[in-house]
Structure formats: C-alpha cells, structure tokens
Image (cartoon, helix red, strand yellow):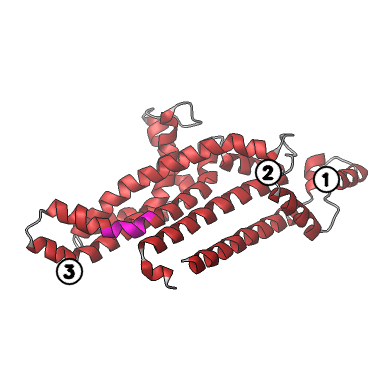
C-alpha cells in the first residue's frame, strides 16, 4: 500500500508540474503582457520600463522558477488588474465555486444512481435504452449551449428561476444542473455496469434462493458492492465539475474562481491566470489521488499492483 501511495504521489506531482509549465509558457507566448497592461498607445520606453518592473524582460525559465519558488512559499504575486494580492482574490472567489461544485455533484449522484440501478434492472429493454440516451446526451451537449437553453426556458419564458448571479439558493439551481449534466453519464454508466455484474453474481443468486425481497437484494447486496467504484469516480467527476465551472460561471455571471480566471485571461492578468490554473490543477490531482487511494482501500487487487 505504501508503494502504491508513493507512486501515486509522484505521478500527481508530475502532472501538476506539467500543467504549470504548459500554462506558464502559453501565457507568455500569447502576446506581450507589458503591451496589454500599458495599452496600445504606450511608447516603447514605457513598455520597456514596465517589462523591467514586472520582471518580464528576464528569460522565461528564470521567470518560471522565480514564480514557482514564491508560490511554494504561499506568495502568488499581485494582480495586474485588481491591484491586490492574488491569494486574497482566490480566497474570496473560492467559496462560490466550491458551493456550486458540491451542489452539482449532489444533483449528479441523485440522478445517476437511481437511473443506473433502473437501467441494470431492465437490461436490454426500452427503459435501458432510454436511460442510455440520457447518458449520451450528457456527453454530447455542450455546457454553454445547455446553460443558454435553460436560461431561455426557465428564466426568460417561464420566469421561474434567476438567470444571472446568485442572490439566494435558487441562483444555484440552473448552473448546478448544467454542471451535473456533464458528470451524470460517467456515474450512470458505472453504476449500471456494476449493478449488472452484481445481479449476475453468485451471492445475489444465493440471496434469491433464501427468499429475500427484491428491494433487499438490489439495495443491500447488489448495490453495496456496485457502489464501491462509483464512490471513487464521483471524486474524479467533482474535479471535472470544478474545472468546467469556468464556462458555466461566465454563462450565468457567477463571480467564482472560474469567472475570475476568464476575466483575467481577457485582461492579460497573468498572475491571476497562473494561480487559477494552479488551483484547478491541484484540486483535480488531489481528488484523483483520493479516488485512487479509496479504490485501493476497497479493492485489495489494486494495492498489489
């Protein structure tokens, strides 16, 4: 188990480092940050002075190592656009995004688990195929399109729900459903697959022979075993949900970390962009690592690898 943990940690660190190097490089080759900050009418001298003040005239590897060293000590720099500490900006926007993500994964589980069980119980018939179409739609429909459609239907036409911002709990419903719709297919299909295997297993046949009720067999025996990998994949899907919050927060004008990242990209606020990328990379890697460890704890075969 210790060897498995160490390999997972090393892999997680390599993934974070790779993401940071790529995002850092793309941010710098996308244009001259000093020109974006000084404005198109600024003189060459002003631009050169600003580059020197911000350290942008140094070699790119030196800039990256300097930023990584400061980030490792908790200093993410200062925002070019908002003129305050990046760490403070992130801290003020994180609660909104995390709340949205938790609500979304809760909706995804509430929808996917029952549908997965139902599809397994009706394997191969019309109900199974109809539920499969739901999973297919979740993979095929773009988040921004679904968000706009929900805004038109439930916000503009019916007037049931708010279409912009989060003033109370109703503001989370539409954006959380859009994010949940992305996670539903993976959880649904894994639940269905696990339930199908469990229903065909010897211990379920033994439970039937003992005369146990259908509900007891499905929920107490089959689902308990089928749910083990679902718990692990739910953690990974939460990472996808938080990462996908950028598009949804922009569509619904929700001032979370995703919106902050998009706004900073538009304005060329590199320190904030890099911090947002770092945050999402760390969140996803940590959740993936937790999913691996949870899977290893539940399945001894994984620990033996």
Q: Quadrant of the C terminus?
A: bottom left
Residue at image coords 8%, 63%: 209
Q: Quadrant of residue 150?
A: top left
Return the disc, 2 or 1, that comes first in the chain's sequence: 1
Quickly name the residue at label 1. 54
| Residue 130 in sight in this render | no
Return the disc, 1 or 3, that comes first in the chain's sequence: 1
Quickly name the residue at label 3. 202
Q: Within 10 Å of the Cα at label 3, are there few (<14), some (14-19), or many (20+) other Cα atoms?
A: few
Query: Left of 228 or right of it: where is 141?
Result: right
Q: Within 10 Å of the Cα at label 1, are there few (<14), some (14-19), or many (20+) other Cα atoms?
A: few
| Residue 216 in sight in this render | yes
Q: Quadrant of residue 291?
A: bottom left
Give the residue at the far bottom of this rendering.
305
Foreground mark, 1 or 3, reads 3
Give the residue at the far front of this rendering.
2
The vertical placement of 156 against 129, above or below, is above
Judged by its main secondary structure, the magenta piece is helix
What kind of element bears circle 2?
A: helix
Q: CA distance from mark 2 to mark 1?
A: 14 Å
What percent of the width, then of the height, locates residue 76? 70, 44
Residue stretch in magenta:
225-231
Residue at image coords 24%, 66%: 197
Quickly name the residue at label 2. 272
Determine whether label 1 and label 3 are within 8 Å by CB: no
What percent of the width, then of the height, locates residue 222? 22, 59
Residue at image coords 60%, 61%: 13
Query: Left of 40 or right of it: where is 289?
Result: left
Q: CA distance from mark 3 to mark 2?
A: 55 Å
């Amino acid at each position: 188990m210790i060897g498995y943990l160490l390999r997972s940690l090393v892999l997680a660190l390599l993934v974070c480092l790779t993401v940071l190097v790529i995002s850092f490089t793309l941010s710098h080759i996308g244009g001259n940050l000093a020109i974006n900050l000084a404005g198109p009418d600024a003189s060459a001298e002003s631009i050169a002075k600003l580059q020197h003040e911000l350290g942008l005239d140094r070699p790119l590897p030196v800039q990256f190592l300097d930023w990584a060293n400061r980030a490792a000590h908790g200093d993410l720099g200062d925002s070019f656009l908002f003129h305050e500490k990046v760490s403070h900006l992130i801290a003020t926007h994180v609660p909104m995004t995390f709340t949205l993500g938790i609500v979304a994964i809760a909706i995804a589980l509430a929808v996917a688990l029952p549908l997965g069980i139902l599809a397994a119980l009706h394997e191969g018939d019309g109900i199974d195929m109809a539920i499969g179409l739901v999973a297919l739609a979740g993979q095929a429909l773009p988040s921004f399109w679904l968000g706009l459609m929900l805004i038109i239907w439930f916000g503009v036409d019916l007037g049931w729900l708010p279409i912009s911002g989060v003033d109370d709990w109703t503001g989370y419903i539409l954006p959380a459903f859009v994010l949940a719709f992305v996670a539903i297919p993976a959880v649904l299909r894994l639940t269905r697959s696990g339930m199908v295997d469990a229903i065909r297993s010897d211990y379920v046949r033994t439970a039937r022979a003992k005369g146990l009720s259908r509900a007891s067999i499905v929920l107490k025996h089959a689902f308990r075993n089928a749910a083990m990998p679902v718990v692990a994949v739910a953690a990974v899907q939460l990472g996808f949900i938080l990462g996908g919050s950028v598009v949804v927060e922009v569509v619904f004008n929700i001032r979370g970390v995703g919106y902050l990242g998009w706004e900073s990209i538009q304005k060329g606020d590199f320190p904030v962009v890099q911090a947002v990328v770092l945050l999402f990379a760390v969140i996803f890697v940590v959740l993936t690592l937790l999913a691996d460890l949870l899977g290893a704890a539940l399945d001894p075969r994984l620990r033996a690898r």
